[in-house]
Image (tube, coloured by chain):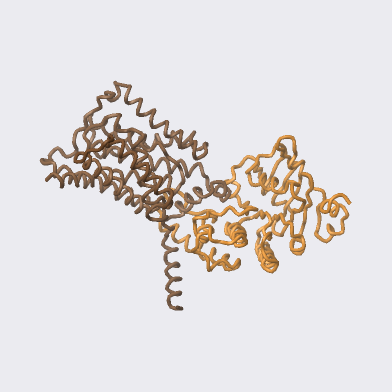
Chain colours: A brown, B orange
Amino acid sequence: MGPLLYGLDVIVYIGIFGIVSLSLNLEFGFAGLANFGKVAFFLVGAYTYALLSQIGVPFYLCLIAGGLISAIFGLVVSLPALRLRADYLAIAVLAFGEILRLIVKSEYWLARGDWGIRVLPVFPWAGSHLAYRLENIGLVYFCLCICFLVVQLLANSPYGRAMRAIREDEVAAEALGKNRSKFKAQALMLGSAMAGVAGGLYAQYLQYVLPDVFMPMVTFTVWIMVLLGGPANNWGVLLGAALVEIFDRGTNIIKDYITLPVDPTNLQYILFGALIIFVLLYRPQGLLKESTIKTKALRSIFNGRSSAKNKRS
Amino acid sequence: MEEALLRISEVSKHFGGVYAVNGVSLDINHGGICGLVGPNGSGKTTLFNIILGLHQPDRGDIYFKEKRINNLAPHQIYELGIVNAFQIPRLFFNLSVLDNMLVAARGQQGDRLLNSLFLRKRWQEQEKGLIDEAMGILEVVELSHLAFSPAAELSGGQRRLLEVARGIMAKPTLLLLDEPAAGINPELANKIFQKLEEFSRNGIAFFIVEHRLEILFDFATWVYVMDKGRIVIAGHPRTIIDDPTFYSVYLGEG
């Protein structure tokens, strides 16, 4: 029973972080925004969920509220940040994440600071650990499917094309009629909303929120997922999320069974760092390369062409 | 008298102490090919950037169809129908040649967030038409066989062609071209200008910076000569060729 429960636990985590990495893919992979404050929006979603569920709001409303409030935070951050160049944007949102974490940590009235708050389970009737995990898998993967569908539809539309154009050369895109501030603000809002929903799911699954869960390391983990899997490829980032979670959880188990001369947690960070360097050096496009834009019309003429070519040869 | 399509009135712009554009006034009429020539550093590109909203002029006004456009953002100027092809091609290198073309289409239904998700039928119909147009233009500039290749794989000359083609894709009222014929073989350059002339008969006005005067003067209907930030001569290419000032501007003080 142990290994099965652990495996299901990993599957829940893959789902939750799959959503977060999809949201970062929308922002970074497609729109080129270096959001190094992903954890901030994850935190907003988680705390919104926790606080609302405490006063008896039904869980689906908590999730939606988490997404909406997170989107508002995304918009607020985007207003000054979009005037900044990409690298300064990264620093600004990174700081924003830490500020939020320190606020919930030190403002006791808000969410009991370091003590954190309990979150009531959505499925109180879930008798066993097994049922509890299965129900969470259902909920998380339902949300994941919606997020995947949204990002996938956007990526393969004129809107996604404009976003990619802004990523490639924002001045040229602006000169070609794309309002880059609008596109960037929308990408940040939508990405934050998705991260907020994922935060809510996370709070619900853990049944507890603590400030220390939302360290900057969460952001970097999500970045590894996206860079490893392949930016601008939605299947790729899901693959990245799965691999990183399996690695993360797997090493968590292994470290209980082997003795190491160094602190295993630090070793995990070192391995993550090495992994990023390795990916960026040898496979900068990630495991799966950028997916091309496939609208219905494009696909039909592309297929027409390749079949014509086949006939000729 | 017919109103000018674009009217530039007493526009100046300086960088530090140097006037890049110094009190320039000119008119561009509907249709036709208008040339802008002058030695390097005479302020041609700066003037273009001012028209496009990339630079704010220090003084002076710009009117497009009688409407003052000084304070509009570049994307708003684009939506009015003033389109630009950059001197050094600024393509979206990881996107396909065809996608580069499609980005440029004006008035797209599907480049709004909610439309792209919920009004898919509407923009998919529109996109079919846009793809046909784009392929037609790519055919003309001999890039259609590369439609699905990333723009990064194009050669230098092909990149220029795509940059021009992208401008035409926008169906502009006024298309600014910064040296469209540079780095392209003479035969193809001639062909491009023939195509431009054809497009100009369909109502696109061109404002073209070009150093290859032998080609430009064959096609231009009006030419402005710029030197040190000022317009020094204006007229039909035939009269300009006979103007002694023209030679002193181009060949240095004679």
Say which residue appears at 32% left-offset and 22% top-offset: A107
Residue A194 is situated, as x and y percent measured from the top left of the image, at 34, 42
Q: Who is closer to the viewer here, B230 or A96?
A: A96
Residue B105: image quadrant is bottom right
Residue A96 is situated, as x and y percent measured from the top left of the image, at 41, 31
Please identify the residue farthest to the bottom as the structure is shown: A312
Q: Who is closer to the viewer here, B32 or A37?
A: A37
Q: Who is closer to the viewer here, B183 or A260?
A: A260
Above or below, comparing residue B10 to residue B109 in the picture: above
- Does A89 sit left or right of A17 as displayed? right
Question: Is residue B244 visible in this depiction of the protein?
Answer: yes
Residue A207 is situated, as x and y percent measured from the top left of the image, at 21, 34
Residue B142 is situated, as x and y percent measured from the top left of the image, at 59, 68
Say which residue appears at 45% left-offset and 57% top-offset: B123
Question: Is residue A65 visible in this depiction of the protein?
Answer: no
Residue B23: image quadrant is top right
Above or below, comparing residue A94 to residue B99 in the picture: above
- Does A267 sit left or right of A258 as displayed? right
Please identify the residue farthest to the front as the structure is shown: A261
Q: So how many labels did they put on this image?
A: 0
- Does A223 sit left or right of B159 as displayed? left
Above or below, comparing residue A134 to residue A41 in the picture: below
